[in-house]
Amino acid sequence: MRLETMIVEQLETDTQRRPWLRRVWFFGRVSLVLLTILAVKVLVHRMHWELLAPNPLFPALVASEVFLLGFLLNGVLLDYKEGEKIPGELAAALECLATEARSVRELHPEAEVMGPLALLAGFSEDLLAWMNNGGLVTTLLNRLDELQHSIERLSIWNAAPLQARLLLELANIRRVVVRIEVIRETTFVPTVYWMAYAGTGFLTGGLILTEIEPFGESLFFIGVISFLLIKLLMLIADLDNPFARGEAMAVENVTLLPVALTVHRLKRLVEAG
């Protein structure tokens, strides 16, 4: 437990160690938008600009907006749940590579395995930094190519089935790295996003321009509906990229602790020789 705490402190910045600060800031941004909407509603009421009357179609508008948000939330949650598994899969693949590479020396003491292990440790550090801060994936893939060439040279001593397992783990790592890049760069159905933003804007604007009595109750209902819609829409946009730890506005990100622990173990392994 103490080791995990030390690694977490090395991995995360002050704001990432206290994710509640980001959540409070997220809530504050939503509150600022909400206060602006309520202020506009008060201004419209005092200037007698409320041009619309309550209409039975308003519940239908709310229901259609909730349907769009539900569609978006369901889509981004699939990628988010997949993203939660990725750090563990990467950590397991890196550990397996190190274990298999070390086992070569048990059968062939003359085998040169420290070179591949050092490259593996260096690649794992670069992988953690890339997952934490972002950057060009091509640089990371070039490091992976270098590691693969080094692993392939172990075939001089390694049996074919064991060598195939090493290459399979490398292929799994490459697949997961590319998958992370796709998740980062792909926005889930941008057209539906624009529809959801437009629907929220039209619905909020309609509520502002609708004369609802008593006025105090109208402020309450407008505030509650606007708060839920805006907060959910901003949350969906945040969940769309679960690997955005390097972005200041990101709130909900997957943990990188399994990869950080593996990096620490590999570094100790290389230092021990």
Image: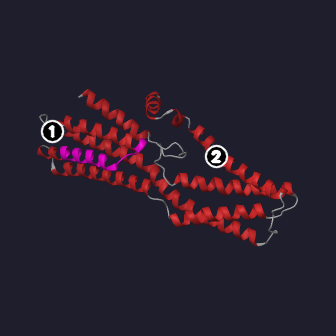
Q: Is residue 138 magenta?
A: yes
On the picture, is 52 further left or further right than 100? right
On the picture, is 154 further left or further right than 165? left
Please say if 52 is above or below 116: below
Q: Residue at x 59, y 52 (%)?
A: 235
Determine which residue is flagged by label 2.
29
CA neighbours of label 1 inside 10 A, class few (<14), some (14 to 19), many (20+): few
Cβ atoms under marks 1 and 2 closer than 8 Å: no
Residue 67 image offset from top left, x and y in percent: 63, 66
Residue 170 image offset from top left, x and y in percent: 27, 49
- Image quadrant in which the C terminus is located: top left
Cα gap from disc 1 to disc 2, whole angstroms: 61 Å
Q: Which corner quadrant of the image does residue 49 belong to?
A: bottom right
Q: Which residues are magenta?
A: 131-151
CA neighbours of label 2 inside 10 A, class few (<14), some (14 to 19), many (20+): some
Q: Residue at x 59, y 53 (%)?
A: 234
Tell me the kind of residue under disc 1.
Leu
Q: Residue at x 49, y 44 (%)?
A: 247
Determine which residue is flagged by label 1.
107
Q: Is residue 35 magenta?
A: no
Secondary structure under the numbered disc 1 in the rendered image: helix
Mark found first going from the N terminus, 1 or 2: 2
**249 vs 95, nearest the viewer:** 249
Tell me the kind of residue under disc 2.
Arg
Q: Main secondary structure of the magenta part?
A: helix
**85 vs 150, nearest the viewer:** 150
Q: In front of the other: label 1 or label 2? A: 2
Q: Which corner quadrant of the image does residue 201 belong to?
A: bottom right
Q: Residue at x 86, y 57 (%)?
A: 215
**181 vs 158, nearest the viewer:** 181
Residue 182 image offset from top left, x and y in percent: 40, 56
